[in-house]
């Protein structure tokens, strides 16, 4: 089964007298696991370590039994080989590209298969009408949909969502989450959703990891510990 397993330690010295560290161990089965915690508790640090954008001081990360990082064995696959989709609040869509071009960017090769993949996912996330528009010409909710489509079009093994919906109003949020849930029903992958919004956590989530000052405090009732 496609389970994400992570055990990681990472510390920073953000100020002369301040030291901050993340020290966590958790597993995420297919479906949504919410990481819930106040600002500065280390949520983004954890996702960046999983994505390969930040190197843990020590630890082990695997998806479906395949090791992506293992400090003891010097395993550290580069982000582009991890097949992890990552969407954050700032989105990082290319401003000069249309929605279709942004989505197509991560797909290798070219030709009709690529065009079909983009067309399909535009339909699935209901943004076909925005295909030829640039990020500056569409709404915030549509931009969020484009970012999700771009992260999912390559069929990643894991999806990381770092407060991607927090700037949207509740109705838009629920609409997008409903479409995302439908997509995930057909492709059961672990999804880690970082949020500090309880509504968002409840709308998408099953399991919850509570993060406080870099440590997991409690796992929700339904959490799975392996
Ligand atoms: P969250 O996403 O929960 O708000 P972060 O993971 O962004 O928290 O940050 C947790 C702590 O780690 C913060 O205190 C922050 O100052 C510190 N931190 C994050 N990245 C760095 C960095 N590159 N250098 C130094 N300190 C950092
Ligand atoms: Mg953060």
Image (cartoon, rainbow, N blue to C red):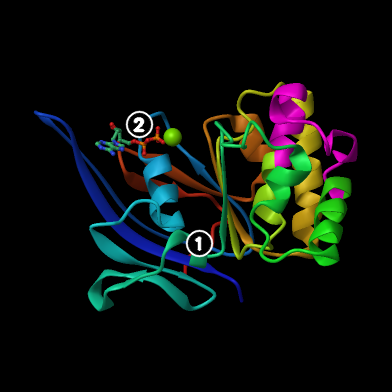
Q: Is residue 169 above or below residue 12?
A: above
Which quadrant of the frame does ligand 2 lie within?
top left
Q: Quadrant of the N terminus?
A: bottom right
Looking at the rendering, the stretch of residues picked out in magenta corresponds to 124-146
Q: Nearer the viewer, residue 153 or 162?
A: 153
User: Residue 91: which disc?
Assistant: none
Q: Secondary structure at mark 1?
A: helix
Where is residue 33? Give x, y as percent: 57, 52
Which of discs 2 and 1 lies nearer the camera? The answer is: 1
User: Is residue 104 in view from this perspective?
Assistant: yes
User: Most prominent secondary structure in the magenta stretch?
Assistant: helix
Residue found at x 41% / y 49%: 48
Q: Which residue is mark 1?
A: 80
Q: CA distance from mark 2 to mark 1?
A: 27 Å
Depth check: give the residue in front, 135 or 83.
135
| Residue 87 location (% of width, % of height) | 58, 43
> What residue does disc 2 label?
40
Residue at the (24%, 75%) spot, across then down: 72
Q: Are marks 2 and 1 in contact (CB under 8 Å)?
A: no
Q: Nearer the viewer, residue 150 or 179?
A: 150
Q: Is residue 85 above or below residue 147?
A: below
Q: Is residue 186 left or right of residue 203?
A: right
Mark 2 C-beta to ligand 1 under 8 Å: yes
């Amino acid at each position: 089964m496609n389970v994400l397993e992570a055990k990681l330690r990472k510390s920073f010295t953000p100020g002369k007298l301040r030291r901050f560290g993340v020290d966590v161990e958790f597993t995420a089965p297919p479906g949504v696991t919410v990481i819930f915690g106040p600002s500065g508790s280390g949520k983004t640090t954890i996702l960046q370590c999983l994505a390969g954008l930040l190197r843990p001081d020590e630890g082990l990360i695997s998806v479906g039994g395949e090791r992506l990082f293992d400090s003891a064995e010097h395993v550290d696959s580069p982000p582009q080989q991890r097949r992890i989709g990552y969407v954050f609040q700032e989105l990082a869509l290319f401003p000069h590209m249309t929605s279709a071009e942004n989505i197509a960017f991560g797909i290798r090769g070219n030709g009709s298969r690529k065009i079909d993949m983009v067309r399909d996912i535009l339909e699935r996330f209901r943004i076909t009408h925005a295909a030829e528009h640039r990020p500056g010409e569409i709404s915030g909710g549509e931009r969020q949909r484009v970012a999700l489509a771009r992260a999912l079009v390559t069929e990643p093994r894991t999806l990381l969502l770092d407060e991607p919906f927090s700037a949207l109003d509740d109705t838009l949020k629920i609409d997008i989450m409903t479409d995302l849930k439908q997509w995930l029903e057909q492709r059961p992958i672990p999804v880690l959703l970082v949020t500090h919004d309880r509504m968002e956590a409840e709308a998408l989530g099953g399991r919850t990891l509570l993060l406080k000052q870099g440590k997991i405090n409690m796992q929700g009732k339904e959490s799975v510990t392996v």
